[in-house]
Amino acid sequence: MVLVLSISSLAVFADELFTAEDIFSLEYASDPQISPDGTQVVYIRNSNDIMTDGKNSNLWLIDVKSQQQLPLFSDDKQYSQPRWSADGKKIAFVSNLTGSHQIHVHYLKENKTALVSQLQTKISNLTWSPDGKWLAFTQKVQEEPTVIAKMPKKPKGAKWNKPVIVIDQAYYQADGKGLIQPGYQQIFVIPSEGGTPRQLTHDSYHHQGTLAWSHDSTAIVFSANRQQDWEYKRLEGNLYQVQVATGELIELTSSPGKEYNPVFSENGKKLSFLAGSNELNPYRNAKLHIMDWKTKKISEITKDFDRSVRDQQWLSNTSLAFSYDDFGKRKLATITTKGKIKDLTDTLSGTTLGRPYISGSYTASTSGKMAYTYGNASSPADVAVIDSSKKASVLTQLNDDLLAHKTLGKVHEVNYKSAFDGEPIQGWYITPPNFDPKKKYPLILEIHGGPHLAYGPHFSAELQRFAAQGYVVFYNNHRGSSSYGERFAMLLKYKYSSVEDFADHDSGVNAMIDLGFIDDKNLFIAGGSAGGIATAYAIGLTDRFSAAVVAKPVINWLSKVLTADSGLGQIPTQFPGMPWDHVEHYWKRSPMSLVGNVTTPTMLITGEKDLRTPMAQTEQYYQALKLRKIDTVLVKVPDSYHGIAAKPSRMITKIEHTLAWFEKYRTSQK
């Protein structure tokens, strides 16, 4: 009798839909770090705080064999960068336990934690030395701001306005940060038992990214762009070695392009690294290389592999693990030093809650085991382990308490050809809970950003909310998307946006209508960033959509590239030249050039502090549409940069405003 009641109760819960409030209850795992012997995993357990509208990032420890997990640090503080010592007895991490973010070391057997540092600025790239005596990290060394004019001395007690800010650098602002304070990222070491940090690199260049200790703990290899005009050469970077004792700097590579992410084999005889071309293209594959440490001879391992290699890590002295994106999924694979590749799983996923972007990470140990973030279309990331025989186990179920009792929309794959040139396009659609294929449903086309990014069959809080409200949600990887190789990504070179990517979207809508359950009188379109650009461009080419939501768009490329934080890199790679030399080309790519055609009711939403697609872009479009008396509303997100959904309430705001706008124009079937 009790069993029957339990089943009945679960059936009732199963009818619950995914609500806006549920976003606060979602959790996900990130940065899983497997111990050197492969027996334990420490990971960051991320959850939302409904009272502070923030995120809690705690450290949890899992025993792989028993699958028992324990809280290592679980409170209202923030934890990041957990890293195992080589002997597996200690875990270093960064936390604000003492009020500011500092390096700590936790001794597992003794269950004691030591405060190691007293630093003043952000700590990145925390890395143990093989002998366990040192911790290396990067940190910004502040410099005095530029002063042009000497001002008179302010009288005691006088209240003058704030002093002016003098900017003389080409790269002077960054989205999420604002104006960049003068200074450069430098490499430091500090004793692992605490002490005084020592700066190893100097000069006016950024030294950052992966830090690779030599086998004997005497040197660190890293990547840096130390060219005199580095601000203008964003695609360059070489590998360097710095001696810990003396600070002596040696250049290891000098090929055109960028060499980065150095990782030593366990015996220290080989150095793997990634390299990317310096060709002025908007997309390029990263290739795996291996350097013989004694001779410094370099071999390219993935020359014929038409995907971008990510985050290579040694499994043994003759094989490595790496991840790569392929047809909308992130795969974990192994590769020998001779280039033989074997896929292990395509389930790395789940570390972006909002939209279904490819995501996920892993770590490998020389025991042959790997820990990774496991996710799918119905759940954000959990922690899983796998070995080279493809034997995998999922160790956590972080969202079963919430999502097991929810009826989510189901994700389906759809493949079709673009009407422009017959190019095959991969897409997905989510059907609403309790879907009936005999009925007609309104459709939302949601376009991803980038544009050289990719969606896939991954969990999406935003799109699940749309489905819960009765919409079929369609999304695709149009030309220019990553995970399909260089040729496909390069189809958008000098064509972002254009009638070509619009055809990919429009053909997808037609393919959805052909399935028989879409109400072609209730079609809606939305997208953010590059997706916002594509949405604004689309409604300048067609009136088939009942309403549009354009989030954080570029409307006028002529002004955008000279006001945003990305212009230095974007102008040479995505355009044929400077805007004043190619006015017609920039204007043709701009949705503003088509605004005279727009009849679609349009909501615009952008962060007030956005430096990637500045608010002035959105306001230009808003004013233009108002002048044409098109029904338009502008939603400004206070104190927000480009990531307008970074906080839980902001994600909910974006979702619910989108739904409200579409509901305003959604017509009932007769």
Image: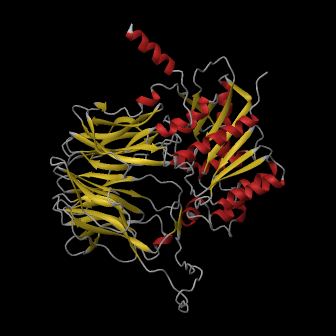
Residue 504's image quarter? top right
Task: In this rendered view, identify the residue nearer to me: 646 or 88.
Answer: 646
In which quadrant is the N terminus drawn? top left
Residue nearest the observer in this picture, 28 or 531: 28
Instruction: Please report the residue visible at 43 percent of the width from the left and 46 percent of the height from the top.
Output: 307
Rendered location of residue 138, percent (x, y): 33, 65
- Going by the image, does 485 lie left or right of 518? left
228 shown above or below 624 = below
Residue at 55% over, 52% down: 643
Quadrant in the picture for residue 554: bottom right
Q: Residue at x 54, y 89 (%)?
A: 154
Asked whether 203 or 261 is in front, the reply is 203
Q: Is residue 623 above or below residue 463?
A: below
Q: Position of residue 86 (x, y in %)?
A: 18, 52
| Residue 315 picture location, percent across and down | 24, 45
Quarter where residue 40 is shown = top left
* Residue 195 percent across, percent down from the top left: 21, 68
Above/below status of 59 relative to 432: below
Above-or-below relation of 214 to 348? below
